[in-house]
Image (cartoon, grey):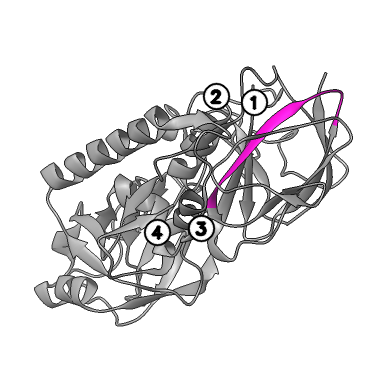
Amino acid sequence: MTALTVRDCGAGTSIQDGGRFGYRRYGVGPAGAMDRVALAVANMLVGNEPGTGAIEFAVFGGQFEVEGGDIRVALAGAMAEMKIDGEPVAPLTSVTVKAGQVISIAPARLGTFMVLAVAGGFDLKPDLGSQSFHLRAGLGGVERGPVKAGQTLHVLGGPVGPDLMATVAPKVHAGAYRVVLGPQDDYFTEAGIATLTSQAYTISAQADRMGYRLSGPAVEHAKGFNIVSDGIPTGAIQVPGSGEPIVLLADCGTTGGYPKIATLISADLPRFVQQRPGSEVRFMVVGRDEAIQAAREQAAMLQAVKAGLQPVGGGLDSGRLLSLNLVDGWVSAQAEEAIL
């Protein structure tokens, strides 16, 4: 069986797929890739389904040696360089790697989360229907743990057909992050809601897969800051007694006792999670219909990327490389759209 031997990787490296759903009522959250657009793009480049399990890196990359035969891989997400035996691979391109060759993923230059997909996915036993590693629940991953140096990750299947490159760059919406108010926006004064949507916040150092705590003006409560605990969706913005918001992400708990002023729409989550501590973020309120439309537009964008895949060598010119390397959308709060 083909495999990747982990020579080195950062502490935040884990196996993540499309997530674990249907168990919130039992206290088990979905986990899954922080940047699901990146997961889908990396998987489509190697011929997998969008939610197939892949290796997720947090800022720091890693080094892997291929064993047992050819393996096809693709990298997407934060801006980082992948090399095979020291030779760089063009961005948004899959590459077939032979046994004995070494895959090196450099630390991200922009953004936070990168995803390395392999054709066929990894031979890992799922927990509750998912390979996603959830640290606090002790589920999924490699024997219910993160990816570590010295491990061997067995690969299912192998390369079929030619390597592929994206001729249509994946894009995400830019500008202020869009939120839908509620479900407890009545626990805040009008001034408090105006503060959230008119002031800039900074992502603090307290940021991980569970959530990003924000620093900035305090959001004013109207009825105190304790509620009877209720369910938490991914992207919920809860406001504890300090008045500084917390955006809850893939590994968040399933219930909480702080009021939630708003929820970040799903289409904007992939861009939000790529922000690093110190990054400035702003929020704007949209309605439910606009949130649904944004999700549909993101799905259509991914379909366009998939439809534009071409065999490597068919149009790999300097213009394409330059366009795919101009990855600055993760830190832009002004542009109309950003390139993944």
Give the magenta-colored segment's residue range. Answer: 67-77
Quadrant of res 328: bottom left
Q: CA distance from mark 3 to mark 4?
A: 20 Å
Under tag 3, what secondary structure?
helix
Residue 311, above or below 158: below
Q: Nearer the viewer, residue 160 or 125?
A: 160
Q: Which residue is mark 3?
A: 325
Mark 3 vs mark 1: which is more N-terminal?
A: 1
Residue 72 % position (x, y): 68, 30
Residue 105 is labelled as none
- Decide: few, some or many residues near mark 3? Use Cα within 10 Å; few <14, some 14-19, many ≥20: some
Residue 42, above or below 174: above
Q: Which residue is mark 2?
A: 48
Q: CA distance from mark 4 to mark 1?
A: 26 Å
Q: CA distance from mark 2 to mark 4?
A: 25 Å
Under tag 2, what secondary structure?
loop
Q: Is residue 68 within the magenta segment?
A: yes
Residue 272 is labelled as 4
Q: Which residue is mark 1?
A: 121
Residue 177 % position (x, y): 28, 61
Residue 225, above or below 96: below
Q: Nearer the viewer, residue 186 or 337?
A: 337
Query: Quick check: marks 1 and 2 in contact, CB under 8 Å?
Result: yes
Residue 113 % position (x, y): 55, 54
Which one is in front in this view, the residue at disc 3 or the one at disc 1?
A: 3
